[in-house]
Image (cartoon, helix red, strand yellow):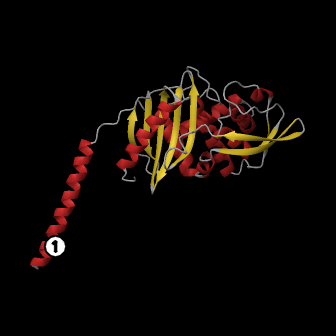
Amino acid sequence: MKVKSRVLMAGAIVAIAGIVMLLILTLTRPPLEIEAHNAALMDSSSGQLLFGQREHEHSSPGSLTKLMTIYLIYDRVAQGKLYWTEPVQVSRRAAAIDGSKVGLKETEVLDVESLLYCIALPSGGDAALAMGEHLAGTEANFVELMNRTAADLGMKDTHYTNIPGFDSPQHFSSAYDLSLLARHLVEHFPDILRVSSQMETTISRQVNGEKISTVLRNTNTLIPLYRGCNGLKTGHTIGAGYCLCATAQRQEAKLIAVVMGAESIENREQETVKMLDYGFDSLHAN
């Protein structure tokens, strides 16, 4: 009995020492400081917010707006209301759009899967508008759908006025809402990570009767630089600054980091890396 008691006592001492060491590490860890204006770090599995900096403040999301179009594409495919091989004709308005675009031509026809790649990798506003018009008839109708969906997903700090993500006083979101949207996207439709983790792909197009190939390059240059990074979307406008919604996984730990209002591409990547490192350290998944 004495030997058993000693073994139990030794085990208890080891356990207590481990807890004390964990508390010391937690208490002595320097606070996370992010230079970007808004930031949020979320545990994708649980939805727990691990870090926030003005995470509920209304801010221009830039092309992170397109995450909602991507979500709605997957949602409609899952419901059987849309098919990956379904043809979509590009309107004059979509072809003439300003901002980031693929260069789609009026009356050109692409399938839904190709348009998804056009939105997810090079952030094609022309492709996003073409999909929105295809799904809802007009941009105005699709924007209504975007706002209804945002409300359904619990995005309380978000209001959309356009599909591509142009700056507008009434077009805003928050770092928390975007991390919430990203979580719904990757947890319900994990195929998006297969798409968004590709640094480039090639699609075939028919333009004026001529078959051409177009290389689509991913604007998320953090993917090959950070171990475990597998998505998700970049954004930039004058009003939004440089934005990034990044996803990463190590072992079983899955993180979503949102940075808004960074000063440059390099700055948004540096701040995102700081948050991801902090998150994986918190979840002990290094």
x%, y% of residue 84? 73, 49
Q: In the drawing, does residue 282 fall left or right of residue 114?
A: left
Pointer 1 local density, CA inside 10 Å: few below 14, some 14–19, many at least 20: few
Front in this rendered view, residue 193 or 94:
193
Asked if residue 4 can be seen in this view, the reply is yes
Local secondary structure at mark 1: helix
Q: Could you tell me how many numbered marks the image carries?
A: 1
Query: From the viewer's perspective, is 11 left or right of 283?
Result: left
Q: Residue at x 61, y 48 (%)?
A: 192
Please say whether residue 56 is visible from this viewpoint: no
Pick out the residue farthest to the bottom.
Answer: 1
Q: Quadrant of residue 211 in the image?
A: top right
Query: Where the N terminus falls, by quadrant?
Result: bottom left
User: Residue at horizontal 80%, vertical 27%?
Assistant: 92
Which residue carries the number 1 mark?
A: 7
Q: Among all residues in the image, which is located at the extreme front?
A: 225
Instruction: Name the residue type under label 1.
Output: Val
**92 in relation to 110, above or below:** above
> For this rendering, which residue is in front, 119 or 80?
119
The residue most toward the left is: 2
The image shows residue 67 at horizontal and vertical percentages of 59, 38
Relative placement, left or right, of 140 versus 176 is right
Q: Nearer the viewer, residue 211 or 59?
A: 211
Residue that sits furthest to the right in the current view? 209
Residue 125 vs 181, above or below: the answer is above
Instruction: Give the quadrant of residue 16.
Output: bottom left
Looking at the picture, does residue 255 appear above or below residue 125? Answer: below
Q: Position of residue 130 (x, y in %)?
A: 74, 34
